[in-house]
Structures are given as C-alpha cells and as structure tokens.
Image (cartoon, rainbow, N blue to C red):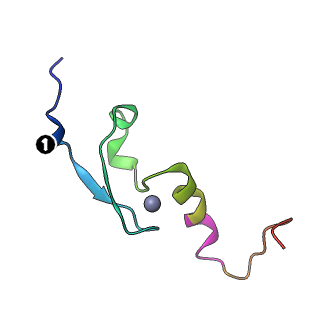
Amino acid sequence: MKAIPKNQLPQKTCPVCQRPFTWRKKWERDWDRVLYCSERCRRQSKTTPRPHNHLPGSL
Ligand SMILES: [Zn+2]
C-alpha cells in the first residue's frame, strides 16, 4: 500500500461547522459516508434541524 501525500488528501466541508476537514486513515473505508468533521458535529447535526426538541438535562 502506498501512502497518500498529505497535500493530496481529499477534503470535505462539514455542514455543521462549515469548516473543511481532511481525509483521515480511520475513514478510509467509509469516506463516502463521512459528512461531518467530528463526532461532535455529527451529533449536533441531529439536534440542529429540530430546535423544538429539548435535550433532557441541557436546561
Ligand atoms: Zn464540523
């Protein structure tokens, strides 16, 4: 296996924080399905579209 040069790694823009993020080794199998830069944004994406949905314990 050949390592991909760092400056040639694919990039995507996170729809939650609007920041670009770069391909990571842990995503190599499901890069196509990766939409968010982090677990935190992925979770946030589930709460953001529902402003009426209060999270228990979040005041
Ligand atoms: Zn993000």
Q: Residue 5's image quarter?
A: top left
Q: Can you give x and y, in whole percent of width and height, for residue 9 in the image? A: 19, 42
Q: Quadrant of the C terminus?
A: bottom right
Magenta part of the protein: which range? 45-50
Left or right of 3 on screen, residue 17: right
Q: Quadrant of the N terminus?
A: top left
Residue tagged by mark 1?
8
Left or right of 37 on screen, residue 9: left
Splitting the image into four quadrants, where does ligand 1 fall?
Answer: bottom left
Vertical side of 3 occupied by 41: above or below: below
Q: Nearer the viewer, residue 7 or 55?
A: 7
Cβ of mark 1 under 8 Å from ligand 1: the answer is no
Mark 1, other Cα within 10 Å: few <14 / some 14–19 / many ≥20: few
Numbered label tally:
1
Residue at figure coordinates x 16%, y 31% from the top left:
4
Q: Nearer the viewer, residue 25 or 33?
A: 25
Q: Is residue 43 magenta?
A: no
Residue at figure coordinates x 32%, y 34% from the top left:
28
Amino acid type at circle 1 is: Gln
Q: Can you give x and y, in whole percent of width and height, for residue 2 in the image? A: 15, 21
Q: Can you give x and y, in whole percent of width and height, for residue 24 in the image? A: 34, 38
Left or right of 9 on screen, residue 41: right
Q: Nearer the viewer, residue 17 or 55?
A: 17
Q: Can you give x and y, in whole percent of width and height, for residue 37 in the image? A: 42, 53
Q: Is residue 46 magenta?
A: yes
